[in-house]
Image (cartoon, rainbow, N blue to C red):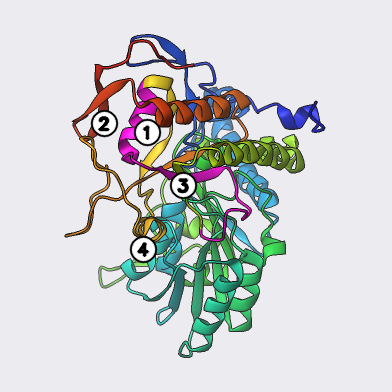
Amino acid sequence: MSLLPTAVRAPLAVLGRDVQVPLADGEKVEYAALDYAASSPALQRVWDDVAAYAPYYGSVHRGAGYLSQLSTDLFEQSRRTVAEFLDLREGDQVVFTRATTDSLNLLAGAVPAGTRVFAFETEHHASLLPWAHAGLAVTYLRAPRSRAEAVAALDTALAAAPEGPKLLCVTGASNVTGELWPVAELTRTAHRHGARVVLDAAQLAPHHRVSVRELGVDWIAFSGHKIYAPFGAGVLAGRADWLDAAEPYLAGGGATRTVAREADGSVAVEWNTGPARHEAGSPNVIGAYAIASACRALTEAGWDALEAREQQLAARLTAGLAEIPQVKVLNLFGADSARVGVLSFVVEGWNSSHFSAALSAEYGIGVRDGLFCAHPLVRTLLGDEDVAPSECGAPEPSLPGERSLNAIRVSFGAGTPDEHVERFLTAVRELVTDGAAWTYRNEGGRCVAAVQVDRGRRAG
């Protein structure tokens, strides 16, 4: 009998929980969504909140009518809800964006000229690439093999850095291994050297309570679609000074305080300060409201209960995979390192694309395979791993002269029922022991079932 309270054992209600999907043999099963790290399903409550607001949709910040004023109030209340969710400091601001990638590109454009950026090669491309793309000097740090090594490597790099503004960009939880990074320790180290810190919380915010005040980071970025909210919206929150001093991210209505025609025919512009400076155009009020609704739902569900239940699922998953000798789980900091509900692995004798396709076609399980938009990290983790060839190949292109590399990622969260994890473990064991029940071929870049070879076995 479980000692955990009922609230811990029960998943939150999400859209698509009862969706039936076809298998290769024509039968249908309930879909097991285990790709939360890419996009989590929307919470039913979030969807209901958005549906209730939809008839009252109106323009934001511009209109005198009732619906416009209602929408403006809703939009600005959503900003306050997000600020409370993140435990921001007085003076911090919340800017609504399209997603984490958009948030970090916005910050990259606001960083003062001459800033040197520091990032571990383990970052997702969204937090690895915007800085050089914006013309900033970047120091890429090697993948550490422990949390202490990460802190020491940053300390050494910052001590050797030239004078001038500095910025560390670091993830809160890896989108490949799920491992938690020592954000507070890295932040203290960065601040000791006069560097600022932006936290990529795309994989952290859906799984853990996040306090900007306690972590000490200067900015934080995350996406709505990772935190159980639909629609294309995200958040960049934190210190106002660099954002207010920078040129607006986009030029247009809303970002301007005044625009006047000059005598010489030119146009003089006075830009807004605060969030409006970087939110030009009609804002995505529904996206912002959906994020705020998800923030409220997670907070009210109780982080202690949510984290306890997720750790229960994670322990079952890791223990189950550990019983299968052919499975190798990928990690940076060791097998016992703390992680959120994200785990990647490879299977001896299998190409990961082939294995993932079999999970889908024969068991109705959705996972992710490839390099997960974190190519340097996955290549480091795979190292000399012998990746099996397959007629399906890998979805990610390899470097010139490099053999194909790919892994399998399983991820889950507050909406995942226990049965989906159990079905996944059963499927992995059966595929490793018995092989796939179908042959597979490459079709338009996707690995799909072709010919059945064992009609006696189907998804359990």
Marks 2 and 1 close (CB-CB < 8 Å) = yes
- For the N terminus, the quadrant is top right
Magenta-highlighted residues: 332-361
Vertical relation: 131 (above or below) 60: below
Q: Pointer 1: what residue?
A: 356
Give the side of residue 298 with respect to residue 200, left or right. Answer: right
Closer to the observer: label 1 or label 4?
Answer: 1
Q: Residue 340: tell me if it is visible.
A: yes
State the residue position of label 4. Answer: 129
Label 1 or label 3, whichever comes before in sequence order: 3
Q: Give neighbour class at mark 2: few <14, some 14-19, many 20+ (Cα, 10 Å).
A: many
For image coordinates 66% across by 48% down, the residue present is 208
For label 4, the SS is loop
Residue 247 can be seen, yes or no: no
| SS for callout 1 | helix
Q: Amino acid at mark 4?
A: Leu
First in sequence: mark 2 or mark 1? Answer: 1
Identity, as a three-letter code, of the amino acid under mark 2: Cys
**How many residues crowd around disc 4 within 10 Å: few (fewer than 14), some, or many (20 or more)?**
some
Q: Label 2 vs label 1: CA separation? A: 9 Å
| x 51%, y 21%: residue | 16
Badge 2 marks a residue whose secondary structure is strand
Of residues 166 and 84, the one drawn nearer to the viewer in this rendering: 166
Query: Which mark, residue 328?
Result: 3
Q: Residues within 10 Å of mark 3 (few under 14, many from 20)?
A: some
The residues bearing labels 2 and 4 have C-alpha atoms spaced at a distance of: 29 Å
Q: In front of the other: label 2 or label 4?
A: 2
